Image: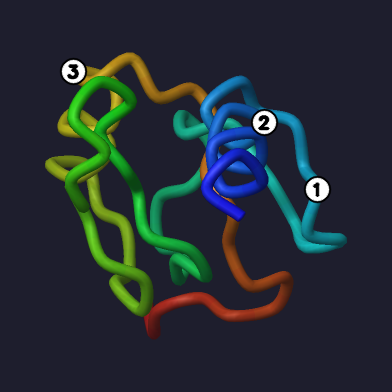
Amino acid sequence: MHLDFEFFQHAIDCGINMTGKLAIPVSESVGRLLMIDVIDPVTRDVVIPSGVTLDIQLIDVCESYGIDYVIVYKHAHSPS
């Protein structure tokens, strides 16, 4: 079971979408609602929890961890 999680997490870290959900580049995710936690690729700690709407500061956090893609809800945006 642990191997399955590691494989799944590695796929997410590499931007491979194995969930059937919308994976988009971090740079295009401002205002989008996270479906899956953003995980530190080294420590596996949660960096940004699911359910959070991404803003410019959180995009910078993702990029500082080397995260290129996030999985978001297809039609969920924060109110403008």
Q: Position of residue 22 (x, y in %)?
A: 75, 56
For the residue carrying disc 2, how many other residues have a C-alpha within 10 Å: few (<14), some (14-19), or many (20+)?
Answer: few
Res. 73 image quadrant: bottom right
Which element carries disc 3, helix, strand or loop? helix
Callout 2 touching callout 1 (CB < 8 Å): yes
Label ID, residue 18: 1
Residue ID at (60%, 39%): 3
Res. 72 image quadrant: bottom right
Position of residue 41 relative to residue 6, above or below, is above
As shown in the figure, which amino acid type bears the numbered disc 2?
Answer: Ala
Say whether disc 2 or disc 3 marks the residue closer to the N-terminus.
2
Marks 2 and 3 sit apart, C-alpha to C-alpha, by 19 Å
Label ID, residue 41: none
Label ID, residue 11: 2
In the image, taking residue 25 as reference, residue 17 lies left or right, namely right
Residue ID at (75%, 31%): 16
Position of residue 26 relative to residue 48, above or below, is above
Which element carries disc 1, helix, strand or loop? loop
* Numbered disc in front, either 1 or 3: 1
* Numbered disc in front, either 2 or 3: 2
Residue ID at (25%, 33%): 40
As shown in the figure, which amino acid type bears the numbered disc 1?
Answer: Met
For the residue carrying disc 3, how many other residues have a C-alpha within 10 Å: few (<14), some (14-19), or many (20+)?
Answer: few
Say whether disc 2 or disc 1 marks the residue closer to the N-terminus.
2
Q: Position of residue 15 (x, y in %)?
A: 65, 28
Q: Position of residue 52 (x, y in %)?
A: 29, 72
Callout 1 touching callout 3 (CB < 8 Å): no
The figure's colour scheme reads rainbow
Marks 1 and 3 sit apart, C-alpha to C-alpha, by 24 Å
Say whether disc 1 or disc 3 marks the residue closer to the N-terminus.
1
